[in-house]
Every structure is written in C-alpha cells, then in structure tokens.
Amino acid sequence: MDETLVLDSAQQSLNLDRPGNGRRVSILGVPLGFGSSLAGVDIGPAAIRVARLSQRIAQLGYEVRDLGDMRIARPSTNAAPTESPKYLSEMTEACENLAVEVRDILRDGEIPLVIGGDHSIAIGSIAGVASYCRDRDETLGLIWFDAHADMNTPETSPTGNIHGMPLSALLGFGVPELTHVAGFAPKLDPRFCAHIGARDIDQGERELIRRLGTRFITMREIDERGMSACMDEAIAIASKATAGYCVTFDVDVMDPGDAPGSGTLVRGGLTYRESHLAMEKIAEAGGMLSLEVVEINTALDVNNRTAELGVELILSALGKRIL
C-alpha cells in the first residue's frame, strides 16, 4: 500500500478520535438551587468539575475555557408555602445575567456548556441562545430531556417552584419577569421543540401541551418505538430551525438506578445506554448550539456517581465514540 495512503488513513483515524478538532467550549457553572425545594443541587457544578470535566473535554480535541461559576444572589428569606412563583426577583436577576453570559460565549465563536443547578436556569441559558439567534434573524430549535414536562405556570404549579416552569416560560407562558428575560418573548416556536422522556406530567401542563402541539416523546413511546427512532424524530424537529438547536438534559430523565443523584426521581426512565445513544446521535447529526446538564443533587448522589455520568454524557454529546 502507498505510504501516503497509510499516513492519510492514520490521520483520519486520529481526527475521529479527536472530534473537537480545535473547536472551543466554554464551561459556565450556575450554582442555583432555589428554583427547587431541596438543598444540594446548587453544588452540582462543583461535583461535575470533580469528575475532571475540562480535562476530559480537552482530550477530545476541544479548546476548553472554564469561566467558573456565576455569582448568584441568593434569597435572604424563605418563600411562603403558597407563594407562586417562589423567589421571582432573585430568579429573574440570575436568568437575565445568565442570558448575557451565554450570548457572549456564542458571539465569541464558542459552544456554551452550562452546568447547573436546577432546571430553572434554562430560562436564562436558552434565552441567551435565542437572543443570539434573534440578532442574526434565525430561528432556534430545542431538544429537552426530562422526566417532567416543566410546562407549569404559576397558576397551575402545585408547588410554586420555578424549576417546574422553564419550558412554558420560554414558550411565552407565565409571568412577564420570566417570559421576557432578555427582553422578548417567546424564545421558541413549539414546531421546533422536542421533549424526550416524560413520565410525570401535571394536568395543567397536559392541557398546555395539547394546546400548543409541542412534540412530547414519552417513555411509553420510547419503549414501543426504540430510542434510535425517537431521537431521529427529535433531531429532525429541532433541525427545522434555521440556526440549530439547544440541548438541555435533566438527569432525572434517567432511571434512578443509573442516576440516583436527583431530587425529583421518577422510576422507569432512560437507561444508561439509551441516554448515551441519544447524546451520540446528537453529536453525529451536528447542529447543537449549546448544551446544558442540570439537577445533579450532591446531597442525594452516591459516590459522585450521577456527576460522573453527567460528564460521560457531555463527552458523548461532544463526539466521543466507542470506536
């Protein structure tokens, strides 16, 4: 065999092993836990970093910039049990600041990797991507992994916790302080959104989902059709947007046997391999503008197992392969 062909083949193999190929990733921690009702989720960014997040992304060939954790103004008093939404002013401030940070990362030509924190932070992170796309007159898609719909409003929420409201806020439903983060609403068109893994949906959420026609691929459908077919559909939906799509991954979408470190566990979730397959297919499809992993609760985790899993899934979404 020609020596040049051998060298070219070896170089191609090396490039496959380093899918980043010099692209840049910026890591931003958001240690915010007051969108939920359990302590421990605010330490999620630290737990993920303990699992060598930056070093392992760099091994894939990316340039990595860790921006550290955002400064979060925490509530000085506890919310009343009947208050809805809880901690609205503090949440609004955090999400406005997060939106600016994420938009600036994209303007610098980097991939935002946001690590939470509870899922309320998606109001800010996805607002930042949507703002970036809006400036370029482009539309944004979304793939949302979650055991819950996250489609409550203050009127339908049984708890008043904002981590159950982010997707509805991004679609323009809820209080103006949340729907208009970054100065406009809605951030997303339901036609370009796919929700994966739901198995615990409140009645008010169910009504809004049917009203909007948002595509929800529930666990039953995943059981019946298989994860590969469901991901192909979700990617096709999100890819109809002209700019690409965000990916936000709540670890409670997985079965508690694989991901015990979450405060909102629901049995019967995605398996370890189904979750990796989903991330691998996203990497192969291209089009991902930002990635977010949330709801890792260190107080409930076992030997940092869920945080380690979060890092593994991030690597798969960024292109790591078995071969």
Image (tube, helix red, strand yellow):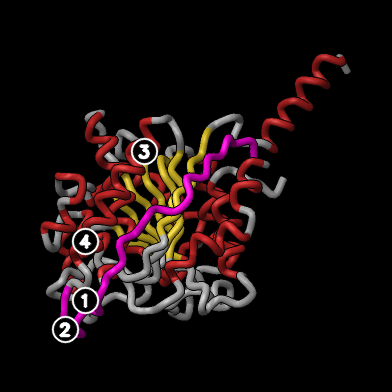
Check the picture and name the quadrant holding the C terminus: top right
Position of residue 56 relative to residue 203, above or below, is: above
Q: Report if residue 274 is visible in the image.
A: no
Is label 4 in a helix, a strand or a loop? helix
Label 3 and label 4: CA atoms lie apart by: 20 Å
Name the residue nearer the viewer: 243 or 197.
243
Residue 123 is situated, as x and y percent measured from the top left of the image, at: 27, 55
Circle 1: residue type: Gly
Q: Which residue is mark 4?
A: 168
Name the residue nearer the viewer: 293 or 207.
293
Position of residue 117 relative to residue 237, above or below, is: below
Residue stretch in magenta: 60-84
Residue name at image x 35 percent, y 36 percent: 104
Q: Reading the chain from its start, which is encountered first: label 3 or label 1?
A: 1
Circle 4: residue type: Ser
Per the rendering, the mark at residue 82 is 2
Left or right: 314 as drawn, with respect to 194: right
Asked if marks 4 and 1 touch (Cβ < 8 Å), the reply is no
Q: Reading the chain from its start, which is encountered first: label 2 or label 3?
A: 2
Label 4 and label 1: CA atoms lie apart by: 14 Å
Label 2 and label 1: CA atoms lie apart by: 7 Å
Left or right: 63 as drawn, with respect to 186: right
Q: Reading the chain from its start, which is encountered first: label 2 or label 1?
A: 2
Residue 148 is situated, as x and y percent measured from the top left of the image, at: 34, 71
Q: Which residue is mark 3?
A: 244
The residue most toward the front is 76
Is label 1 in a helix, a strand or a loop? loop
Circle 2: residue type: Thr
Label 2 and label 4: CA atoms lie apart by: 20 Å
> Badge 2, how many Cα within 10 Å: few under 14, some, many 20+?
few
